[in-house]
């Protein structure tokens, strides 16, 4: 069985206080998908505030 492990783990860190606030698992460009997410929740508010 030839199994490819293309997944990675990523973390978003608030540059204002260096607090780790979101951990995710993804592949491809998943880590960037949160940057264009327009859902109103704590994660997207922190990402928007820190960019």
Image (cartoon, helix red, strand yellow):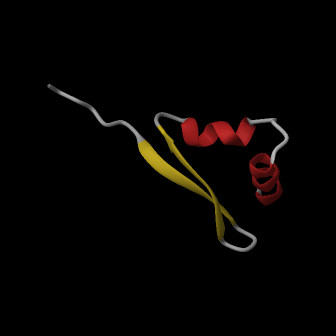
Asked if residue 7 lies left or right of residue 23, the reply is: left
Q: Camera-side residue: 40 or 48?
A: 40
Quadrant in which the C terminus is drawn = bottom right
Residue 1 lies in what quarter of the image?
top left
Residue at (77%, 59%) from the top-left corner? Answer: 50
- Residue 7 in the image: above or below residue 42: above
- Residue 46 in the image: above or below residue 26: below
Asked if residue 1 lies left or right of residue 50, the reply is: left
**Name of the residue lying farthest toward the left:** 1
- Residue 11 in the image: above or below residue 31: below
**Name of the residue lying farthest toward the bottom:** 17
Where residue 45 appears, as percent x and y from the top left, is 82, 51
Residue at (56%, 56%) from the top-left corner? Answer: 11
Asked if residue 51 lies left or right of residue 34, the reply is: right
Residue at (74%, 50%) from the top-left corner? Answer: 43
- Residue 51 in the image: above or below residue 3: below
Where residue 25 appears, as percent x and y from the top left, is 49, 43
Residue 37 lies in what quarter of the image?
top right
Where residue 38 appears, as percent x and y from the top left, is 81, 35
Question: How many numbered discs, if any?
Answer: 0
**Name of the residue lying farthest toward the front:** 41
Asked if residue 13 lies left or right of residue 16, the reply is: left
Where residue 26 appears, as percent x and y from the top left, is 49, 39
């Amino acid at each position: 069985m030839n199994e490819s492990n293309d997944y990675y783990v990523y973390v978003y860190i608030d540059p204002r206080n260096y607090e780790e606030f979101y951990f995710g698992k993804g592949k491809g460009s998943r880590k960037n998908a949160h940057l264009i997410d327009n859902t109103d929740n704590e994660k997207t508010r922190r990402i928007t505030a820190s960019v």
